[in-house]
Image (cartoon, rainbow, N blue to C red):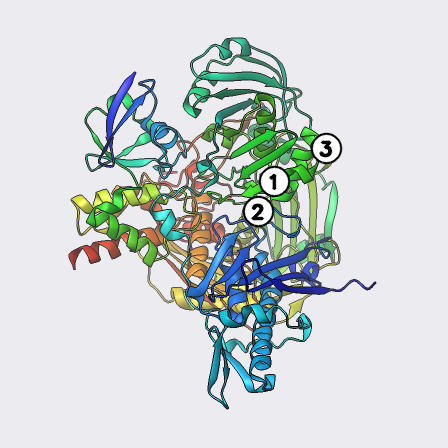
């Protein structure tokens, strides 16, 4: 099947089985490899991208279901003010260890700050609970979200 | 000709400038690491100083998230005396000139601390010599200041860039007589230093093994028998070949080495999704072999049966444990166990390989490339000289990527299809084909005298064997704490034969032993009616070094004073014994020495009536010697390791049934999540000992500290893991 979807502001045409998850279209067809594969079952959040600003798990999103949804990935999230602030906070606080989950963490964190500019610890727990970090950098992820929220108020 | 212990070569770099090449033996390595047979390993460093002053340092070790890629260059740059922002770091490939390219065992710091600094000092020495020659002044009148050589009497200065080419012609100094900086003058070591890779990580740049792309690359999956080492009898591979996108599907006949290429069916397609989808139609008949007794329930029953008899072998005997127990006022018996664990690297195992014209090129996220290259060579019958391995950043190591099974699979599949292939495992493949942290059973018996002093201690350790030998990472040594501190002590071991392969997982052995021993010691403190802190200090006694028992694992010994120091620090920072805690909340203390690091941790936890656990806070106190090289990363590593321990205790654990791992994904193995993750306070006690590593030693105390906190909160003793499988509700 032929699909045209909007990824990072550009129209992308792909000829592919409609059941193919968005994750594999991103990684292996349009060559955006920042979105990661971790579990294939929406359990780890490594594949988190935005559809119309909302965080979704790309490994469980068939390409046929994307329709007119605007997809944003880690490669372009820094084009928004909040996304950029989140990335900068991650650098400032030296969050990552292995780094593999962090694209998904940043996508979830940016979506959180977009709808909740001053998140409480409870807000952070709820919004980030679906994103596993095997290195358990949660202490710094939490601090970096607050750091970005602070910067967003400035 | 005499073999020179340390060898430094200076040459003119391509494009001008100085290239330093160092080959340095690490003589005291075996002694300092407590590991045998590694004296001959050499370390290498390559440093280039370009005419524009830019310093390029090659990071020889794999990077799996512990920050080694910047730590080793920091050591060189410090003594070279250059500005850190003029340092560029290149990742090396597997290269026979670097014989110790491995990440594991928290070894990078103790092994490299002096040699890397000496390389930097040699470079600085040569810069000074070149400047002194240029000016016609004595070397003794020159000094350096971040990339400049200064001649203070005349006020002249020259940059390293301008001197680099001339420095290449200077004689090479003797590495052993070079004067190193006084630590109080460090400008790079000890400074919080950001990981240079983070800007690429946060923008999603392709940098991990899974991101590798080679022109003409196909995608592969590989189905093996879920009973490890099971043999392929037949398959419907012909049917698979006709499925959409499939380019090739074929049976693979492997060997019997569980670390090498095993029997299976490879499916190769235009996309990974197609390959994996086609695989779901596979119908394979396996010969699973003998799976008698290869289930979690069987293991527990066998362990209990073995525990009722004498241990098959003695590990240590001090005094007369039976006489000690007979003298004791209180005798305590308890059985502890811990489960098999998978490493669950978030990046599933993968590898890209291209076999062409008798040559192999491999891109692998590995911790240990050299044995992988050898394995590929032996399996494919291609000389190692024709194999090139690129080390690619790994999405977590944890010990899993010390094995290279994925590497030989990718190479084999590429050879058969005649195209570059990216092999990617699913999460289920990853969990079911691991080298597991072995489960273990401890049957303890201890005696306390009338003063609550521990006078007798026995452990019958039931562990696993493979091919008659103790399984990998399933052993216990005669130095296991509290050995050397109890008058009558007996450690013995029995083994259960195991089919599934085992191997090191972050803080191998210690990650299970620490839970069992430190939980039982807490139990003894409570039985003795002594505060666990006082019980620990009483057991350790006066500060002194207890030498290790002789043998291949003998290390530098155990220092009771260093352990006391971190216990007291953790107690002080956590307010141990000074807080009034609400009902249902408790604090637990545990301490453990591993990988040359001394750590004590206090966990505060709350358990509600429904048995739900909230970990409120963790205090970590560590002693890893005289210098924290990068405090920013050290805090991150210690926090992560402690939380890894908490997550492991709460939610990790695998079951075997009929030789197969039951669990397959993160719905049944539950890694720690944000909601469960408490604040972690990290404190280091700086002591006068050589700096040691930090990837592992903060992990082991976290599990028992949590278990002991749960006991303090509820009166319920945690004697098996994971805690998620236990009922802690008030009615239980």
What's the chain of the residue with tag 3?
A: B
Q: Separation of disc 1 and disc 2 at Cα?
A: 8 Å
| Residue linked to disc 1 | B388
SS for callout 3: loop
Task: Tell me if residue B430 comes above or below residue B400 in the rendering.
Answer: above
The reply to whether the C-beta atoms of the residues labelled 1 and 2 are less than 8 Å apart is yes
**Residue placed farthest to the right in the image?**
B1
SS for callout 2: loop
Q: Residues within 10 Å of mark 1 (few under 14, many from 20)?
A: some
Q: Is residue B532 left or right of residue B302?
A: left
Q: Quadrant of the N terminus of chain B?
A: bottom right
What's the chain of the residue with tag 2?
A: B
Mark in the foreground, 3 or 1: 1
Nearer to us in this view, A100 or B484? A100
Q: Earlier in the sequence, mark 1 or mark 2?
A: 2
Q: Earlier in the sequence, mark 2 or mark 3?
A: 2
| Residue linked to disc 2 | B93
Q: Residue at x 55, y 34 (%)?
A: B434
């Amino acid at each position: 099947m032929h699909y045209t979807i909007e990824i990072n502001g550009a129209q992308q045409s792909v000829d592919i089985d409609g059941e193919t998850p968005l994750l594999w279209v991103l990684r292996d067809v349009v060559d955006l490899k920042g979105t990661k594969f971790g579990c294939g079952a929406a359990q780890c959040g490594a594949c988190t991208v935005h559809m119309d600003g909302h965080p979704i798990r790309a490994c469980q999103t068939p390409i046929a279901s994307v329709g007119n949804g605007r997809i944003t990935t880690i490669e372009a999230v820094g084009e928004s003010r909040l996304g950029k602030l989140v990335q900068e906070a991650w650098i400032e606080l030296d969050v990552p260890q292995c780094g593999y989950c962090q694209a998904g963490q940043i996508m979830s964190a940016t979506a959180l700050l977009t709808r909740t500019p001053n998140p409480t610890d409870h807000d952070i727990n709820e919004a980030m609970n679906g994103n596993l970090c095997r290195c358990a950098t949660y202490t710094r992820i939490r601090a970096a979200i607050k750091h970005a929220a602070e910067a967003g108020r400035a | 000709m005499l073999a020179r212990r340390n060898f430094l070569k200076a040459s003119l770099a391509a494009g001008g400038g100085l290239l330093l090449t160092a080959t340095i033996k690490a003589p005291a390595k075996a002694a300092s690491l407590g590991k045998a047979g590694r004296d001959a390993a050499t370390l290498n460093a390559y440093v280039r100083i370009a005419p524009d002053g830019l310093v390029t340092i090659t990071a020889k070790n794999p990077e799996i998230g512990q920050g080694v890629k910047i730590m080793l260059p920091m050591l060189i740059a410090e003594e070279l005396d250059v500005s850190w922002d003029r340092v560029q770091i290149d990742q090396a490939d597997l290269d026979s000139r670097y014989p110790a390219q491995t990440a594991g065992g928290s070894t990078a710091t103790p092994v490299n601390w002096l040699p890397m600094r000496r390389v930097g000092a040699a470079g600085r020495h040569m810069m000074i010599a070149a400047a002194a020659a240029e000016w016609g002044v004595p070397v003794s009148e020159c000094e350096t200041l971040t990339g400049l050589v200064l001649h203070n009497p005349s006020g002249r200065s020259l940059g390293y860039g301008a001197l680099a080419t001339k420095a290449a012609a200077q004689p090479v100094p003797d590495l052993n007589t070079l004067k190193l900086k006084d630590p109080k003058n460090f400008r790079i070591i000890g400074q919080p230093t950001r990981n240079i890779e983070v800007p690429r990580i946060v923008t999603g740049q392709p940098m991990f093994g899974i991101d590798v792309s080679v022109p003409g690359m196909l995608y592969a999956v590989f189905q093996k028998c879920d009973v490890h080492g099971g043999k392929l009898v037949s398959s419907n591979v012909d049917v698979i070949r006709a499925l959409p996108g499939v380019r090739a599907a074929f049976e693979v006949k492997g060997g019997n080495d569980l670390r090498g290429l095993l029997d299976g069916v490879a499916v190769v397609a235009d996309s990974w999704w197609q390959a994996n989808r086609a695989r779901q139609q596979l119908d394979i008949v396996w010969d699973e072999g003998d799976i008698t007794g290869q289930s979690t329930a069987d293991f527990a029953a066998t362990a209990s049966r073995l525990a009722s008899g004498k241990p098959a072998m003695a590990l240590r005997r001090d005094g007369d444990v039976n006489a000690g127990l007979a003298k004791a006022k209180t005798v305590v018996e308890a059985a502890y166990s811990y489960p098999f664990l998978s490493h669950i690297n978030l990046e599933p195992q993968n590898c890209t390989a291209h076999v062409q014209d008798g040559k192999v090129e491999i891109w692998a996220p590995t911790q240990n490339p050299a044995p992988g290259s050898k394995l590929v060579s032996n399996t494919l019958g291609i000389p190692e000289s024709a194999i090139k391995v690129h080390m690619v950043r790994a999405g977590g190591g944890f010990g899993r990527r010390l094995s290279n099974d994925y590497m030989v699979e990718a190479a084999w599949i590429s050879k058969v299809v005649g195209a570059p292939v990216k092999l990617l495992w699913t999460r289920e493949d990853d969990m079911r084909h691991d080298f597991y942290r072995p489960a273990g059973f401890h049957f303890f018996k201890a005696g306390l005298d009338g003063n609550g002093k521990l006078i007798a201690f026995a452990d019958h350790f039931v562990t696993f064997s493979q091919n008659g030998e103790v399984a990998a990472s399933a052993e216990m040594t005669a130095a296991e704490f509290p050995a050397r501190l109890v008058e009558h002590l007996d450690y013995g071991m029995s083994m259960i034969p195991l089919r599934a392969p085992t191997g090191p997982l972050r803080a191998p052995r210690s990650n299970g032993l620490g839970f069992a021993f430190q939980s039982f010691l807490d139990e003894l403190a409570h039985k003795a009616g002594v505060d666990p802190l006082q019980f620990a200090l009483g057991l350790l006694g006066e500060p002194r070094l207890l030498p290790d028992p002789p043998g291949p694992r003998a290390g530098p010994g155990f220092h009771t004073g260093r352990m006391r120091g971190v216990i007291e620090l953790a107690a002080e920072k956590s307010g141990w014994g000074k807080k009034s805690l609400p009902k249902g909340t408790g604090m637990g203390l545990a301490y453990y020495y591993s990988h040359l690091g001394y750590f004590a941790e206090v966990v505060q936890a709350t358990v509600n009536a429904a048995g739900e656990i909230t970990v409120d806070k963790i205090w970590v106190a560590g002693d890893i010697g005289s210098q924290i090289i990068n405090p920013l990363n050290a805090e991150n590593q210690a926090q992560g390791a402690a939380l890894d321990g908490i997550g492991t205790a709460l939610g990790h654990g695998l079951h075997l049934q009929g030789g197969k791992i039951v669990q397959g994904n993160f719905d049944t193995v539950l890694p720690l999540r944000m909601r469960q993750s408490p604040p972690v306070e990290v404190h280091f006690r700086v002591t006068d000992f050589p700096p040691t590593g930090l990837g592992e030693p903060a992990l082991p105390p976290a599990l028992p500290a949590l278990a002991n906190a749960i006991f303090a909160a509820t009166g319920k003793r945690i004697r098996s893991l994971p805690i998620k499988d236990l009922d802690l509700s008030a009615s239980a």
